[in-house]
Image (tube, grey):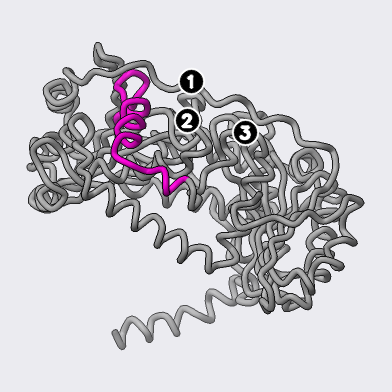
Amino acid sequence: MIKAFALCLALAPAVTAAGFDMSKPPETVPMRPVKLPPRVEWRLKNGLSVVLVSDRRLPMITAILAAPGGEAALPAEDAGLADATADLLTDGTKGKSSLQISDAAELYGGEISAGASPDATYVETSALSDKADAMFDLLSEVVREPSFPEAEVALRKANMQAELEEERAESDFLSGVVFDKKIFAGHPYAAGTPTDASIARLNRARAVAAYQKLLSPRGAILVLVGDLSPERAKTLVAARFGVWSGGEPPADVPPVPAPKAERSIYLLDRPKSSQASLVLGNVAAREDNPAYFDLLVVNGVLGGSFSSRLVRDVREKKGFTYDIRSGLEHRLTASVFSIRTPVRTEVAGPALKEIFAQLKDIREKGPSADELAQAEAYIAGSFARRLETQHGVASAVLHQKIMRLPDDYYDTYVERVLAVTPASAARAARTFMRPDEMTVVAVGDAAGLRGVLAGFSAKPVVAVDRDGD
């Protein structure tokens, strides 16, 4: 160690003499292309599609099975039922109790879980590769033979109510509920969060009916990543899922209607709250839009990382908040651009003013070359890191399939991020960041917020309840 340290000291003058400026960061090395590993795909006679990514680096296998149709495929009065139904898949089968399912997963060195998004219902598990037979046995049993025990349904119902009450204590949660309800008004995407009434409706019969509607091999996708050959994978899948049957998958949800060309502001009153939770945004570009990567990068400049403009201005310079971010959320028939931040009630007005000023500036001037390069490096690097794990690869493949993106979507992801220019980023900001059409939600003390919010819209501020109504 002493010799190595002395060698560094000896070399230091030579490095400095060679012109290295210690006050400047090193130049960024061009990023190598990042591609998903090769995939093998096939389809069973019952309609189940299978994608295998062989990865022999570790003796592990990750599997995610997803069926099209999630929360948005069920009626609004049953909000939360899709996720509850998925959760119940691992709470009992014809041959196993909830505890036995958990124990079986532990025996193959993994775990098994399920859930639902707006557009899909999924089950995922992982295992040591020498326990592949046991993993496929349990995955197939959970997907094909759930029993929905009455006691487990009652427990899930009670837990849903308790979880909802706990979440309602957080302003950020409430602002998200209202935002979704209003930006997707009249559309199935609006009803993604359970309500007291929808939880009260939950029973075994509804869970069984939801299962029969949502879980079918037709249109479903099984993604496998890990230490598994194509021949072995085909044998395992055919034996466990070849006899699976079911009806047609749910129909696609309709496109989200075009928003009204005006700003709308909604206020949920939390009397005497010292903090206001703000969310504002608009429907934006889907991931297959030709200008999507321009929007992705300009969002990174605006509020997509800790070095972004909103963080530097609203958080660091003005001190209005400890957390502010902008982001893009994707669904099958719509994507949303939004900005979220909690602020002290007394600075809600100035904070909104600064946010709109930053939107105006980036729409008119676009990002600088340095800002663009930093955002591109961050986004490309984050993407590459996500693909370092089996779960990251499986999730990327599944997202590409569920959202019906091109087969080479992720193979060209980094190149398209790095191809964004200041001009194309500015153009995307003007097209997809539309402050004059934004849905704005505030959760906080109405007495201190209503007058302030009224100054940001020609329309009256609309009062809403905790379900966004």
Q: Is residue 174 visible?
A: yes
Tell me whether the residue at label 2 lies in contact with that at label 1, contact meaning CB atoms closer than 8 angstroms: yes
Q: Which residue is mark 2?
A: 73
Compared across the picture, whether 457 is left or right of 97 comes to right
Q: Is residue 469 magenta?
A: no
Which residue occupies 50% across, 80% down?
12
The Cα–Cα distance between marks 2 and 1, rounded to whole angstroms, is 8 Å
Q: Position of residue 397 (x, y in %)?
A: 39, 34
Q: Amino acid at mark 2?
A: Ala
**Of the numbered discs in the image, which one, if any, rests on residue 220?**
none
Instruction: Name above or below for residue 386 compared with residue 49.
Output: below
The answer to whether residue 458 is above or below residue 136 is: below
Q: x%, y% of residue 467?
A: 59, 52
Instruction: Tell me the kind of residue under disc 1.
Output: Ala
| Magenta residues (range) | 198-222
- Helix, strand or loop for disc 3: loop
Query: Could you tell whether 419 is left or right of 144 in the image?
Result: right
The residue to which callout 1 is attached is 251
Label 3 sits on residue: 187
Residue 347: percent from left, percent from top? 78, 75
Instruction: Judge by depth and name the residue closer to the eye, 35 or 168.
Output: 168
Q: Residue at x 48, y 20 (%)?
A: 251
Q: Amino acid at mark 3?
A: His
Report the front residue among 110 and 3.
Answer: 110
